[in-house]
Image: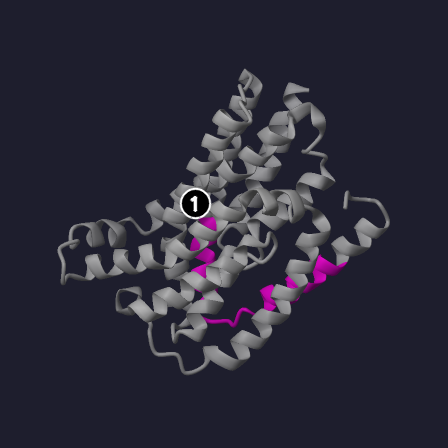
Amino acid sequence: MYLLLIIKAIVIGIVEGVTEFLPISSTGHMIIVGDLINFKDPTYRKAYVDMFEIVIQLGAILAILVLYWNKISGSLKNLAPGKWGFKLWCNIIIAFIPAAVIGFLLDDIIQAKLFNSVTVACALIFGGFLMIFMEKKYRRGNKTNKIEDVTTGQAIRIGCFQCIALWPGMSRSASTIMGAWTSGLTNVAAAEFSFILAIPTMIAATGYSLGKAIFKSKIIMTSPEVIALVVGFVVSFIVALFVVDGFISFLKKKPMRVFAIYRIFIGILVLILSYANIIHA
C-alpha cells in the first residue's frame, strides 16, 4: 500500500506540474485523474487528499520563483514608492484580494459541492467556449506587453476574473489570462502577470489548507503520507520548470484556441465516463 501511495503521488505531481500554468485547470485535472486512479480511496483519508492536492501546487509555484527570479528579485529591490517594483506588487496584491476573500468565505461550500468530476467537466467545457469567445473578441490589438505597465484598474479586473477559478475546472490561469485580455494585456504579458499572481494566491491557499487540516480536521500524517506529500511536491516543481518555459514560447507564436478545444474535448469525455460509471460522479 505504501508503494502504491507513492506511485499515485508521482502521478498527481506530474498532472499538477503540467497543468498548473496551462489554461486547462490543474485542480480539475487532479480531481479527474484522482478519480481514475482512485486516489480518494478511504484508505488515504479525504482530508489528507484535499490537503495534498493544494500543497503540491506550491511546488509548481516555486518553479515561477526560479524561472522569474531576476524579475522578482529586481522588483523587490525597487519596492520604494514611485518605483516599478512597488507598482507591480501593489497591483499583484490588488488582484489577489477578490478571490482570497470569496474563497475564504465559500471554501466549505466549494469543497462540498464542486469538487467532483461532473462539475469539473462542466467547467472545462464552459471555460473552453468562453476562452474561444474572449480570445477572438479581446486579444487582438492589446497594447500592454509588460507586467510593469499594468495599471490599478487592469489589476482589479484581473483579480475579479480570478474569482471564476474558484469553480474547479475553470482554471486560475485561464481566468486571469481572460481577465488580462479584457484589460488590454498581450498574450505573454497576461501569462506572466498570471504567473506572478499565482505566488501569493497559492501560498495563501496552501497555508489555509494546512491550517485547516491541522486544526480543523486534526490530521496527523503517517510517515508514508509525509513522504508522498514531499514526493508530489518535488515532482510538480520539476515538471513545472519545463512546462512554463515551453508555454511562454508557445504564446509568442500561437493563439490559445488549442487549449480551449482540449478543454471541451476532455470535459465531454469525462461526462461520458461519468455517465458510464467509469469514474465517480
Task: Give the magenta-colored segment's residue range.
Answer: 242-268
Colour mapping used in the image: one colour
In percent of width and height, residue 228 lies at 55, 26
Question: Which corner quadrant of the image does residue 94 belong to?
Answer: bottom left
Q: In which quadrant will I find the N terminus? A: top right
- Type of secondary structure dominating the magenta stretch: helix
Percent position of residue 161, x then y: 47, 64
Amino acid at circle 1: Met
| Left or right of 101, for residue 227 | right
Percent of width and height locating residue 57: 49, 42
At horizontal 30% and vertical 67% (from top left) the residue drawn is 152
- Would residue 108 appear left or right of 148 to someone viewing this image? right
Above or below, comparing residue 110 to residue 39 in the picture? below
- Which quadrant holds residue 159? bottom left
Q: Is residue 252 visible?
A: no
Q: Is residue 113 magenta?
A: no
Q: 199 or 281, which lies in front? A: 281
- Give the residue number, with chain letter if any, for mark 1: 202
